[in-house]
Image (spheres, grey):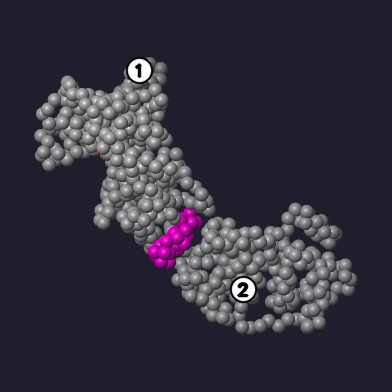
Amino acid sequence: MTKGNINVSVENIFPLIKKFLYSDHEIFLRELVSNATDATLKLKHLTNVGDAKVEYGNPQIEVKIDKEGKKLHIIDQGLGMTADEVEKYINQVAFSGAEEFLDKYKDSAKDSGIIGHFGLGFYSAFMVAEKVEIITKSYKDEPAAHWTCDGSPEFTLETADKTDRGTEIILHIAEDSTEFLEETRISELLLKYNKFMPIPIKFGTKQINDPDFTPKTTTDKDGKETTEPHKQITVDNIINNPNPAWTKQPSELKEEDYSGFYRELYPMQFEEPLFNIHLNVDYPFNLTGILYFPKMGQDINIQKDRIQLYQNQVFVTDNVEGIVPEFLTMLRGVIDSPDIPLNVSRSYLQADGAVKKISSYITRKVADKLKSLFNNNREDFEAKWNDIKIVIEYGMLSEEKFFEKADAFALYPTVDGTYYTYEELYNKIKAKQTDKDDKLVILYASNKDEQHSYIEAAKAKGYQVLLLDSPIVSHLMQKLETTKDKISFARVDADHIDKLIQKDDTKISKLDDDQTKKLDTLLKEVIPSEKFTVQLEPMDSDAAPFIITQPEFMRRMKEMQATGGGGMNMFGNMPEMYNLVVNTNSALVGEILGTKTKKKQERLINQSLDLARLSQGLLKGEELTNFIKRSYEMIK
Ligand SMILES: Nc1ncnc2c1ncn2[C@@H]1O[C@H](COP(=O)(O)OP(=O)(O)OP(=O)(O)O)[C@@H](O)[C@H]1O
């Protein structure tokens, strides 16, 4: 037996590391199962190239709890280690690695939350164990070795009588870590970190119906049929899928494989994804993965099931911020890359060249996929538009490259359900909706019901009205106005229709100057100036007599501020401002002027104002009650 001191400069770094890694104790299992996987894959490689003259077979990794003995075993059938290798890899490599890690991350690691992403390897076993044993037999013709260490730098190394190839790690679980002797806890961890690792992992056994057994059905003398119970057999409980969909070639997979994998990733998610994007690149970096577009609707805050990041099929994190462009963090799925540095802080990650390339590759792939979906099945793409538009609009706002590409597939639906690309829209409305200053005015509504009368007024002029209702669309309009030439967006209720798209032909008012003045004074007496700015306009005689509008600029700034727009805080606190447009050519306005008694005039004005408010959805509560009462009085 050999006794010795592990060569570390710090007298006892175990308690230290325990303290630093407090919140991430659970990663020890991922690390040990990863080592077992590596050892198995290394053996596979050696047998493949003919360097190991042994049978590779169908190796498994087993995780076993010995509750009574307070031990946790991780057993593999990999390449194993000779005593010399234990000396070298465990005493020197593993420990110096741990020491280096500590040195580097002592101060920053705890705050930046990166520890979970960075393995400490074998050493992490001491976060939960007071004593660790390794019993290992190399594939080489040498005796097995038994290494023991109790968490101090001292260890013992002796020969063991293990005859089958591979390594068994035995953790003597510490008093404060007995949670790791619970089956449910271990099972939870295996599913979290090792669900897609490439070597089958056995954790206990389970009962299943024997596939070779066909239950017999017998009929008794009364003709009653009875079927014997299915025969049960005990099989290994394999907790992982060693060949997840993303590791396969897209050509090997069918649509149902993709949706099956989605289910595997998110067992609690019952809604089907809208479509998927298979990522597969090996130059200039390695990256595989499958991204799914979930049904998004209007909700930009759903973040339960997130994209999972793997490194060679080992789960690392579901916080992919910095690796995936922000607008795509709303998607689901997996990304697997050995090239993403995990042992660095997030801010560093964003500046890293490889990561930047990965991020722009993903953006490009997503844009290409969207374009091909649009080209191949436009009808289907239109049907899904409402559920994906937030991601696309967000992408257009945040990634310049995506903005350029999105021109080919971003859609602008009308209130009647026709979907245009920008170019199609432009060609469709150019002739009619260009104003006297040669500016193209794109009209839109944000709510078909609330803005119904305004939409109708615009349609009556032969204009197209878009339905733009996503929460960030105001930002997008702002961006489009600055990138496209001579265009502006205006919501249908931002002014009366002749003002929204001003043409050269000036309308003649039916009222002369005197009458106009009289009307103005009269209206200002009755209409509260703090709520409405009165605006007299000669319009079509059959257009509404009173119309309430809300100027585009102010409203849009407020909306942008509400959905997060830097530097526009001043608009958020502004009171709502409305204009009251009075159509001087309408018959009703003529009647108001011609009415003899002041009282009746006021009644007509108030009633008309309330009707205008009603059509903007502004008449509520007591005012609405009074309006209804008054209206009944009138028709009595
Ligand atoms: N189950 C095992 N079978 C064979 N060798 C092992 C096993 N576990 C660990 N080793 C050896 O010990 C070495 C050190 O392991 P450790 O986990 O500390 O570091 P690592 O796996 O090299 O790197 P990482 O920090 O990424 O885990 C490994 O490189 C390997 O050679």
Q: Classify mark 1: helix, strand or loop.
A: loop
In screen coordinates, is 5 left or right of 614? left
Furthest toward the top, the residue is 221
Q: Position of residue 280 (x, y in %)?
A: 29, 52
Determine if the magenta segment contains residue 401. Answer: yes
Start-end of magenta stretch: 385-410
Residue type of the residue flagged with mark 2 = Leu
* Residue 538, picture quadrant: bottom right
Asked whether disc 2 touches disc 1, contact meaning CB atoms under 8 Å apart, the reply is no
* Residue 99, picture quadrant: top left
Q: Which residue is mark 1?
A: 68
Q: Which residue is mark 2?
A: 500
Where's the N terminus, which quadrant?
top left
Q: Position of residue 106 (x, y in %)?
A: 37, 40
Q: Main secondary structure of the magenta part?
A: helix
Q: Relative to 520, is 631 above or below?
A: above
Q: Relative to 177, is 69 above or below?
A: above
Q: Classify mark 2: helix, strand or loop.
A: helix
Q: Between 70 and 586, which is closer to the camera in this rendering? A: 70
In screen coordinates, is 590 left or right of 117? right
Q: Between 417 and 528, which is closer to the camera in this rendering? A: 528
Instruction: Name the residue rendered at 72%, 73% in the picture.
Output: 535
Structural distance between the alpha carbons of marks 2 and 1: 80 Å
Instruction: Name the residue rendered at 33%, 41% in the picture.
Output: 103
Ligand 1 has an atom within 8 Å of the beta carbon of the residue at disc 1: no
Instruction: Name the residue rendered at 62%, 62% in the picture.
Output: 571
Residue type of the residue flagged with mark 1 = Glu
Q: Between 316 and 130, which is closer to the camera in this rendering? A: 130
Q: Position of residue 246 (x, y in %)?
A: 31, 46
Residue 331 shows up from this direction: yes
